[in-house]
Amino acid sequence: MKLITIPSHLVSTMISALTIILGTLIGALCSWIITNKNTKKSIEEQYRIMRENIKYEESYKRKKICENANVIRLDISTAMFQSVRFLKDYFNKNIERQYPIPINKSYSCTVSSLSDKYSLKELSYIYQFYAIVEKLNYDILNCDISEEDCINKIAEGYKSVLFKLYGDNWTKILEKDIDKASYNELYDNNYMKAGYKEVLKKLDYLCFIENLNKGEK
């Protein structure tokens, strides 16, 4: 049997070719490993940034909800105290110059920001309350305090504010010492309507949760 003899120059060429192919494959493998590793790091970094952004957005949203809840609570509280104080003076014939109840002018946006915290019915309660206060403020700005008809008209407006919150119990809230009573005492009682009491309790709760989150940071 005759053996096939491969010329030495072909052997060298084949070895060189195999070396080049092997080197190319190793280089491609190393390049793939590095690219895959970098891609994985990039994806992990993107997920980390996304998680941080979500966390920031949630924190900002909670803070904004608390701010808006505080604004609404302050508006309602101011209207309650000012109504009780005026009506006490009204019934005691001791009327002084009246000023509009200070409220947030963009309250519709403020209230709508809490739409996922309240039912439509509860949101309606808040809008209705603001509408009554706006009507009262209009009467205060356009009435002459020296005219009895105007005084009576303003008094009816303040009564409407309290009646909206307390119903037929509105006169009972006038028995409280307004200079010593707290905000909670004016709403967390048996006189206030159940619907409005629940709305105000939720406002307190929203602010409590945000303040709690701040304390944990």
Image: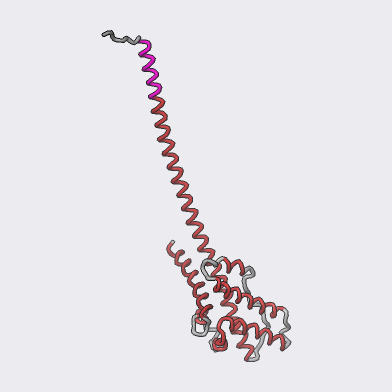
The total number of labels drawn is 0
Quadrant of the image containing the N terminus = top left
The foreground one among 14 and 149 is: 14
Please give the name of the residue rendered at 62% of the width and 70% of the height, measured from the top-left corner: 104
- Give the side of residue 56 with respect to residue 128, left or right: left
Q: How is the image coloured?
A: secondary structure
Q: Position of residue 45 (x, y in %)?
A: 45, 46
Please give the name of the residue rendered at 49% of the width and 84% of the height, measured from the top-left corner: 190
The foreground one among 24 and 98 is: 24
Majority secondary structure of magenta residues: helix
Quadrant of the image containing the C terminus = bottom left
Q: Position of residue 209 (x, y in %)?
A: 46, 68
Please give the name of the residue rendered at 49% of the width and 69% of the height, measured from the top-left corner: 206
Q: Residue lying farthest front? A: 1
Q: Is residue 143 above or below residue 35?
A: below
- Give the side of residue 9 with respect to residue 104, left or right: left
Q: Position of residue 51 (x, y in %)?
A: 46, 53
Please give the name of the residue rendered at 61% of the width and 69% of the height, measured from the top-left corner: 108
Q: Residue lying farthest top? A: 2
The stretch in magenta equals: 8-22
Q: Residue lying farthest left? A: 1
Q: Position of residue 131 (x, y in %)?
A: 64, 75
Verify whether residue 10 appears in magenta.
Answer: yes
Q: Is residue 199 above or below residue 5?
A: below
Verify whether residue 155 appears in magenta.
Answer: no
Q: Please identify the quarter of the rendering in which residue 21 is found.
A: top left
